[in-house]
Amino acid sequence: MFIAMNRFKVVKDGLEEFETLWRNRQSNLHTVPGFQEFHLLKGPEREDHQLYSSHTVWASREAFEDWTRSEAFRASHRGAGGTRPLYLGHPEFEGFEVIQTVDREGRAS
């Protein structure tokens, strides 16, 4: 399993626009082999921004990398830079290999 995250530092007066943009965007993730789950997370508030993170779960790193090279990826990201500046800096990517999972019954894998 592989988890891909992007951190966004969103300017305070752009929070509603940022959330609306994400809620209304066309997502093609469900069409991609290996995709399991997506979450948009709202994190801590700072003096000059609100932290958000997009969080996708993939069957493997290879499945995620295949997504980044796909037409579905290009279609989902078309026009991504076309809105007014909502961010402080660029989104920061973080990728994680899952080494342990504990389920609701307490079973570790």
Image (cartoon, rainbow, N blue to C red):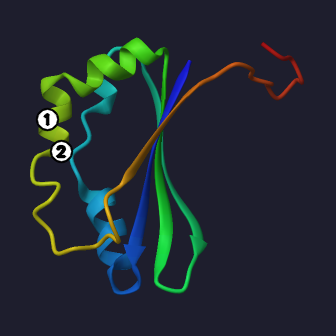
Q: Nearer the viewer, residue 25 or 13?
A: 13
Q: Are marks 2 and 1 in contact (CB under 8 Å)?
A: yes
- Can residue 53 be spotted in the picture? yes
Q: CA distance from mark 2 to mark 1?
A: 5 Å
The answer to which image quadrant residue 19 occupies is bottom left
Query: In the rendered image, which residue does mark 1 sit on?
Result: 74
Where is 15 relative to 2, above or below?
Answer: below
How packed mark 2 is, by other alpha carbons closer than 10 Å (few <14, some 14-19, many 20 or more), is some
Q: Give how far across and how far down residue 94 sits, in percent.
A: 48, 40
The answer to which image quadrant residue 82 occupies is bottom left
Q: Assign the N terminus to one quadrant of the image.
A: top right
How packed mark 1 is, by other alpha carbons closer than 10 Å (few <14, some 14-19, many 20 or more), is few
- Can residue 32 be spotted in the picture? no
Where is 76 relative to 46, above or below?
Answer: above
Residue 101 is labelled as none
Where is 49 relative to 43, above or below?
Answer: below
**Residue pictured at 75% horizontal, 20% vertical:** 100
Q: Give how far across and how far down residue 39 sits, in percent.
A: 49, 46
Where is 63 relative to 87, above or below?
Answer: above
User: What residue occupies the far right of the structure in this picture?
Assistant: 106
Secondary structure at badge 1 equals: helix
Which amino acid type is marked by label 2? His
**Residue pictured at 21% horizontal, 46% vertical:** 26
Q: Give how far across and how far down residue 102 sits, in percent.
A: 80, 24
Q: Nearer the viewer, residue 20 or 99?
A: 99
Q: Is residue 8 left or right of residue 69?
A: right
Query: In the rendered image, which residue does mark 2 sit on?
Result: 77
Which amino acid type is marked by label 1? Arg
Q: Is residue 103 left or right of residue 25?
A: right
Secondary structure at badge 2 equals: helix
**Residue pictured at 28% horizontal, 23% vertical:** 67
